[in-house]
Image (cartoon, rainbow, N blue to C red):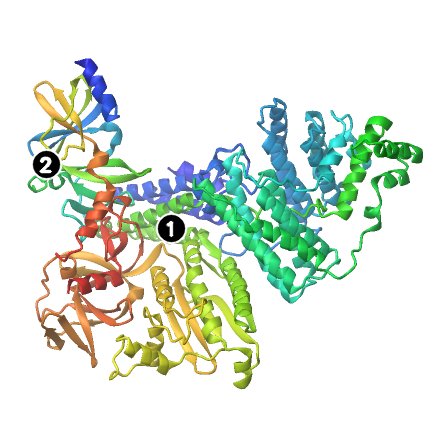
Amino acid sequence: MLAPLAAIASEIAAPAAMRTMAKRLGGSVQSMVDGESSMDDGVVRLAQGVDKLQHSFESIGPNPLLDVPLPESDESESPASDGDNMFDVPLDSIPEHPEPISVHDPEDLDLLKRFIDRQKGELEEFEVAVIEREKGDGTGDDHVKRYLHTLKGEFGVLDLAEWAELIHAVESLLETGGIGTEGLLRLKDLIEERLPSMNSRHGRIVSPEDVARVLERKERPAPEVAQAIADEAPSEEPVSSFGLDTSFLVDFIAEGGDHIRVIEKSLLKLEVTPTDEESLNLVFRSCHTLKGLAGFLELKEIQRLAHAAENLMDRARNKQIVLRPQHVDVLLETTDMFRGLVDGLEKMLGGEAYTPPREIEDVIAKLRESDSLDPLPKLQPTEAAKPMGEILVERGLVEQDVLDQALQTQKAGDTRPLGEILIETQGVNPRDVAQVLGQKVEASRPQPPPPPAQASSGAMAVEESVRVPVQRLDMLIDTIGEAVIAQSMVWADPAFKAAGDLSTEKKIAQASLILRQIQELSMSLRMVSIRSTFQKMARLVRDLARKLDKQIELDMEGEDTELDKTVVENIGDPLIHMVRNSVDHGIETPAERRAAGKPPEGRVRLRAYHKAGSVFIEIEDDGKGLDKDAILKKAIASGKARAEQAYTDQEIYQMVFLPGLSTAKAVTDVSGRGVGMDVVKKNIEALRGMVEIRSEKGKGTCFTIRLPLTLAIIQGMVVRANDERYIVPTLSILSTLRLESQEIQSVVGKGEILNLRGELIRLIRLDSVFGKNTIVDEGSGGVVLVVEDMVGRKVGLVVDQILEQQQVVIKRLGAGIGDVPGVSGGAIMNDGSVSLILDVGGVVKIASESN
Amino acid sequence: MAETMAKDATKTGKARAGKYLTFKLESEEFGLEILKVQEIIQMQSITRVPRTPPFVRGVINLRGKVIPVVDLRLKFAMDHAEDTERTCIVVVQIRNENSVVVMGTIIDEVREVLDIPEASIEDTPSFGTSIDTEFILGMGKIGQNVKILLDIDKVLSAQELSSVTAAADAPA
């Protein structure tokens, strides 16, 4: 057992911190085994737990899904549905945020070093693929293309422009069969040879000899290359084909999503500062990469769309036009289209039919139009404006008369491109033609700019990571949970307590400490930042503000706050609702604001932060605030509140979460239908969170969402009801009190009512809800847990006894049993048995229905 | 004879010959395809899950996983019996809409593993329309004994468990 533990400890790919932990745990368990401990059973169980832990580690360790997916690896053939379920786990130091690496810094040696390290292996695989490709049956072909494209992108990122150009030339040649196995192998040799020196000035340079070395003696002349590049007109048949391995598509969906987010975010920035170069470049690059990827995967719609957007962005980037709001609108529309197409792709992978929407053509047309919307004269770089022939002559590669002759031939009716004529009839070196053409295209057209494409990894931050299927991660977390339970079983073992051996106790205590730490680390692996969710809000606020004719500025804070992946995925919808509400109902029109003495521009603030073991998300606006009277009136009118009762502010505010309650005077298509806020509350409660509202009339409203850090563990109160144990999430308990029989009033047909300091609350006996007859006889004194029902009314849940408070790992009740009302899951207790975790809302609901 | 058997086998769409784990429920013997059996564990304390049908005894901790346990006696409308030291839980893997679900089944006593050739398997006799024999693969004749071979996927369709759960919503 210990040997493999040591093995994970040295497993390179296991996150470093965990490795250390595993090592220490191993030592601890070792000393326990060595000791004369008598709790064989417990120790053996713990040992088993540790054993399983190792397996989990191992399953994470050698995962071949590195940043750059290798087409031939089995793992990359994960089913389509796994597309999103991948996780980038940083390789080292999980708890701290890895140093952000500036992509734009050419001197970033660290980045370069990692690149070099990685290429060593990949070049070997490239070589294998090149050789396989020679067979001509298509194997290896994809890999070669993909690798070259990625490599080009990485060179671009690393600012090794000359290298990127070389790869680009090779890529183009490859398209047309202009380069064969020999050439590709020479390229591999060249890169391999230079790799170690790439961090020096010398290594950055690709000399003409190098180019010649790779491209010389190519198997076929290059005229078609010229044609391929010149042939910019997109194909007119928008048919999607899926000849390729679906794993590429899965990757594309994930990667494309990243790019779309980058584009969207940068566009929003551009709207404010249209000349922000970084954003211009980001959008351009992402469009370019999308185009490239889509082209490779033969996704014509996306390719064409990206191409049109790229054209526009290129002109903006080259300062030929200045982006105006109209441009941004069209580009945002394009982004939506991208998203729709990528979603459609995902659907298609899932076996559903999907037809790309017709509007694509409109959007493309709009993109083209907005291209010409620009009043500025088009500035063409002089070089690019010149015909190719002229450049060739200028460079002394072709004699003037040779060129004239070729031009004559062309005039005489030869429809071939000039380059081709030059090569075929005049014996001009195809390489020269290709080179000039390539440069010309690069200089004048948006086609292949010095490649910025960062085809492999996510959007901006380059951080070394391993992509791990979520399933494995969850397995690891589960197994660690088991180890923790096994550990506490040892602790609870009567034999162990009886033995009273101090030194063994110490060792076990240490092991349990370490286990806890591992558990925390494993939880942190599931954490992702809320950034992307917040970014969606930026778009939402912008669109809404335009629609409603309001001026709104959105502030975001704490986008890097990390939450459990599931929480991040599920918090999006509630947030959208709340932000919508703030914008629609909260913020007034500029006129109203001026009248109220406020600046015309409204402010919505999104904030996320960690505090006291929870995550907080705030949505704050400086609008008109909640109208308490109106809410109360409405609630009373709809029978949800009683006129004679005095409510606290907080209670009144909470009423906005009641279903069907909206104070909006007019139902707009934005909000006001009264659905929404109750859904918000339900969704947040499903994540075991809660919402608090602060509001001041005329000053604004602030919604604070409080969420647990993780969904895998909860703090629970272990209670006894009859002869059964249940766990009640501590978060859902407002207070507890002893049940005194004299305070109970029985209401015929309505059950029991408790007078809680003047407030009447309904009592629900847990055992009777769950079909066991109550034994709590009057006077024996049960315990009342005061909880809230779905609409925030207090309810007393009666149990016999509170046993203890404990942290438990939530387990599903097994797929076979489905959803059980009133039960949200199970937990394994210290004695190895299962206790059920209550869903308080569900229990109250059952009780209400049976009344 | 053998020919008609072969035909019947194709009719049910399953090759029925193979190894079966046989066990006892009341006085009858049943057979379970051995490939469906994950393991056999001793009886342990079961946590009742409220508001589930009576044949769902509850859930247990199977090495860190929570799995449901079904009492086959109750499932087959036999009398409830107190657990004995021979009572045990056969953990089976059932197929449910492309996913594999792990469940425990409580049986009175495990007998043996038998290799039953196709020739010894007869179709389920028809008991008239009122009796559902869909979950029976066939009857295995071993010497004088007849063993009922179960199609455990159908016996324990997860869908049924959860749909009964919904039906059981009426207060107890």
| C-alpha span from label 1 to label 2 | 57 Å
Question: Mark 2 highlights which residue?
Answer: B130
Residue A682: % across, % down = 34, 63
Residue depth check, mark 1 versus mark 2: number of the one nearer the observer? 2
Residue A764 visible? The answer is yes
Three-letter code, disc 1: Leu
Category of crowding for the residue at label 2, using alpha-carbon neighbours closer than 10 angstroms: few (below 14), some (14–19), many (at least 20):
few
Question: Mark 1 highlights which residue?
Answer: A515
Residue A647: % across, % down = 30, 81
Determine whether the residue tagged by mark 2 lies in a helix, strand or loop.
loop
Q: Is residue A207 above or below residue A284?
A: above
Q: Is residue A744 left or right of residue A521?
A: left
Q: Is residue B144 left or right of residue A609?
A: left
Seen from the viewer's position, the closer of residues A649 and A196 is A649
Three-letter code, disc 2: Ser
Quarter holding residue A439: top right
Q: Is residue A339 left or right of residue A406?
A: left
Which residue is most to the front?
Answer: A413
Name which residue lies at 42% across and 74% down.
A666
Chain for numbered disc 1: A
Q: In which quadrant of the rendered image does the C terminus of chain A lie? A: bottom left
Do dots 1 and 2 share one subunit? no
Q: Is residue A561 left or right of residue A150?
A: left
Name which residue lies at 34% across and 72% down.
A661
Residue A398: % across, % down = 89, 34
Q: Is residue A553 above or below residue A53?
A: below
Quarter holding residue A2: top left
Seen from the viewer's position, the closer of residues A574 and B116 is A574
Chain for numbered disc 2: B
Q: In which quadrant of the rendered image does the N terminus of chain A lie? A: top left
Determine whether the residue tagged by mark 1 lies in a helix, strand or loop.
helix
Name which residue lies at 18% across and 71% down.
A762
